[in-house]
Image: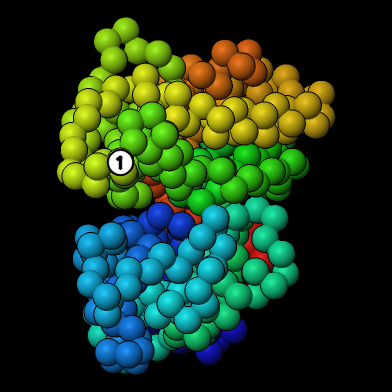
Amino acid sequence: MILDKVIGLFSYDISIDLGTANTIVSVKDRGIVINEPSVVAVQSEKYGKNKILAVGREAKEMVGKTPGGIQAIRPMKDGVIADFDMTEKMIRYFIEKTHKRKTFVRPRIIVCVPYGLTGVERKAVKESAMSAGAREVFLIEEPMAAAIGAGLPIKEPRGNLVVDIGGGTTEIGVISLGGLVISKSIRVAGDKFDMAVVDYVRRKYNLLIGERTGEEIKIDIGSAISLDTPLRMQVKGRDQVSGLLHTIDLTSDDVREAIKESLKEISNALKDVLESMPPDLAGDIVEDGIALTGGGALIRGLDKYLSEIVKLPVYVADEPLLAVAKGTGRALEEIDLLQQLAYE
């Protein structure tokens, strides 16, 4: 215990929201210091034995644009580690960038993970962080972190319901007295929205676009409900019939049609959680409503869409993109909360 305190004088404790789309790193007493895409660009073995060329924002700029000898890899898929080696390298890069030097006393790290990870998946996350330089690793589940970051009174004997729509998973959790009463995780979220847009544009307009363009369309004109004045966007791609470059006009109605099945899956998961909820907690949700967090919460009209389906108030939390990271960081700031919520 004394040794831990001495080591703590020379090391920053770190929290990591290890997301499918973005990785956000917070440092104790400093707040968020890194917010970058979860992408690693490597030079293939043929050209340089998997040499790391870029990580984060710079690597994402290479997605879909790399020559044959370079790969832009997203090591996280559907909220879990798809490439252990690249995940370790990405975490190590962010730790070293946080400390701004190569050698340092190893930090304690708390990592946010989706609810319902298998023991093997949890072990993979923990081993990645340990291999990247942590001296101790805690894991905290996303619904809990999202609720903390959204400012919900999780320690009170009262039901709090949060829906966190990230890049790889949508996490739905009911929290009371500092614990998860009910939780559900589905692998339908931002990435599925992007691919749904890509597939829709290909089917309806015979236009081939990349995943990055699909994401841009979702952000710029995406909507869950019909808008009084539809948003419009010019989209460039390759005509799959003629093979020539082509430009089309896309509207928010197109995007709504493209993502409707994914939104339906999320609403069905939310209904499942509500149907499983203890009656005493249900009354609290009726009164306080449902908090939306994560990048998916920024889709126009999603709160109204879900509210109409479940017949309950739904609202977007402040800074929804950062809710999970802020919640993970707060658990790091309050050691008692960390010990209560995290598991090794």
Residue 268 in which image quadrant: top right
The residue indicated by pointer 1 is 241
Residue 180 against residue 14 in the figure, above or below? above
Q: Residue visible at 74% across and 31% down?
A: 272
On the image, the x and y values in percent for residue 226 come to: 40, 13
Of 69 and 19, nearer the camera is 69
On the image, the x and y values in percent for residue 337 come to: 59, 57
Of 266 and 288, nearer the camera is 266
On the image, the x and y values in percent for residue 13 come to: 43, 72
On the image, the x and y values in percent for residue 284 come to: 68, 23
Residue 229 in which image quadrant: top left
Of 142 and 149, nearer the camera is 142
Residue 321 in which image quadrant: top left
Q: Judging from the image, what secondary structure is the residue with disc 1 in?
A: loop
Kind of residue at badge 1: Val
Q: Residue visible at 45% across and 68% down?
A: 75
Residue 270 against residue 90 in the figure, above or below? above
Residue 99 against residue 49 in the figure, above or below? above
Of 150 and 316, nearer the camera is 316
Q: Residue visible at 64% across and 18% down?
A: 310
- Residue 194 lies left or right of residue 186; in this view the side is left
Residue 86 against residue 341 in the figure, above or below? below
Quarter of the figure with the C terminus: bottom right
State whether residue 336 appears in this view.
no
